[in-house]
Amino acid sequence: MCLCKCSGYRIEPLGGGMPPPKAGCGKPDVPSVLCKTVLKCGPPQPNWIQPEQSPGPNKPESTRKGSPMSTDHSVNVLGIDLSKDSIDAHILPDGKSWQVSTDPDSLAEWVKQLPKGITLAVMEATGRLQNIPAAVLAKANIPVAIVNPKQVRDFAKAIGQHAKTDAIDAQIIAQFGLKIQPSPRPVPGETQMLLAELVGRRRQLISNIVAEQNRLKTANAKPIRRNIEASIRSLNRLLKKIDSDIDEQIRNSPMWSVNKKLLLSVPGVGPVNAHVLLAQLPELGSLSRRQIAALAGLAPFANESGKWRGKRFIRGGRARIRTALYMAALSASTHNPTLRNFYHRLLENGKQKKLALTAVMRRLLTILNAIIRDQKPWRQCKINP
C-alpha cells in the first residue's frame, strides 16, 4: 500500500500474490490494472446498478448497500458456484470452502453444518440450477441473492482474476457479495416455481408445433407428411393438457385468480399474457413504476459523454416478460383507446414505430403494476403519468 502525495488517495494492489507497488504517484511504477484507488476520506463513489436492473431506494452513499466502496466487516457472505451435479461454496471472511452434491438431501445436510451468522448467500442465475439450492437456503432462513452472471464475470476481470474454475468462481462470487452486497430477494415457493415451469413448457410446445408446421410445408413424401401431421396432433394434445394444468393452478390460488381477472380487465391483455406475468413477474404490484420497468428491461439507459448525447437503449431484464408485453402492446395499440391514442401521438411527434411500441409496452406495464397494487380493475385505477 502507498499514499499518493499529489492526490491524497491510498493505492492498494489487487489480487493475491501481487507485489506491493512502490510509493509515489504511480505513473510508471503502479500500473492501473494492478491497483485500485480508495478515497482517504469522504463518501463512497456512485452506486452500481443492482442485479436485474432493479434500482433500490435512495440511501445515503455512506450507508447504501450496493456501493463498490462499502464493505461491512460484520457481513458473512456465502458464495456458491452452481453446476449440474455439484456446487462449490466459499464463505468470506472465514475462507472455508465446500463441494456438495446437488441432491436435495445432501444440500439439506450441508446447510445444517454451515457456520452460524451467514448474512447473505450469493449465486448466479443459471437457468433452473439455482432453484433447489436457493430453496434449501431460504428454508434455513439464510437470505439469498441471485445475481446476473455477467456482473460477476466483469467483477472478476476488474480485480484481475482471469483464471476460471468452479472453486475460483465460488471465491469470486463470495468477494462480489462481500463488496457489492446485492439485495436479497424472496425465493419463489413451490407453487410459483410449478406455474413458471408449466408456462415455460407451454412455450416449448408452441415452438415445437411451429417447427413441425414449417417442416410440413417443405415435405413431399407422403410417409413423412403423415408422420409430421401425427406429431403436430400429439403436440396439440399436450398443449391443451398444459393449458388445463395452468388454469387449474391459477384457480387453486385465490390471489392468482383475482390478479388474473384484474389483468384481463385491460384491453389488449389476453390469458396467455396474464399467465406469463403471474408466473414470471411475481414482483408485479410491489415495486414502483421505474423499478418494475427496469426489472422487465424496459428502462432506457443514458449514453452520454461530455457534450455528446447518444441514443438511449433498453437492455437486460427479463426477455420473456418483454415478449409477452410486446404481443399485448401490439393488440393494445389497436384496441385499447388510451394506449392507442398514446401510440398515435408518439408517431405524430416523429417517433419510429418500434420506439413508439416500446413506449406502449412500458406504459402498459406501468398500468398493470398499478392495477395489481391497488387491486382495482381497468378504468377505476388512477395511473400516474
Image (spheres, rainbow, N blue to C red):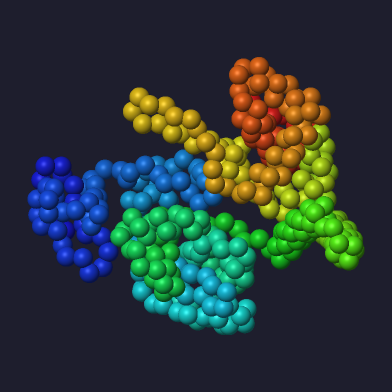
Residue 133 seen in the figure: yes
Q: Above or below — where is 48 with respect to 75? A: above
Task: Pick whichever, 27 or 252, lies toward us.
Answer: 27
The image quarter containing residue 243 is bottom right
Q: Is residue 346 left or right of residue 78?
A: right
Task: Pick whichever, 79 or 357, lies toward us.
Answer: 357
Image quadrant occupied by the C terminus: top right
Q: Above or below — where is 276 with respect to 383? A: below
Q: Above or below — where is 144 with respect to 374? A: below
Residue visible at 53% across and 67% down? Answer: 142
Q: Above or below — where is 78 with respect to 152? A: below
Q: Give the percent coordinates (x, y) of residue 213.
A: 82, 54
Total number of numbered discs in the rendering: 0
Q: Give the percent coordinates (x, y) of residue 68.
A: 36, 51
Residue visible at 68% across and 53% down? Answer: 280
The image quarter containing residue 337 is top right
Q: Give the percent coordinates (x, y) of residue 160.
A: 30, 60
Q: Give the percent coordinates (x, y) of residue 85.
A: 57, 78
Residue visible at 37% across and 60% down? Answer: 156
Residue 258 seen in the figure: no
Toward the top, the furthest residue is: 348
Image quadrant occupied by the N terminus: bottom left
Residue visible at 50% across and 51% down? Answer: 51
Task: Pick whichever, 315 or 16, lies toward us.
Answer: 315
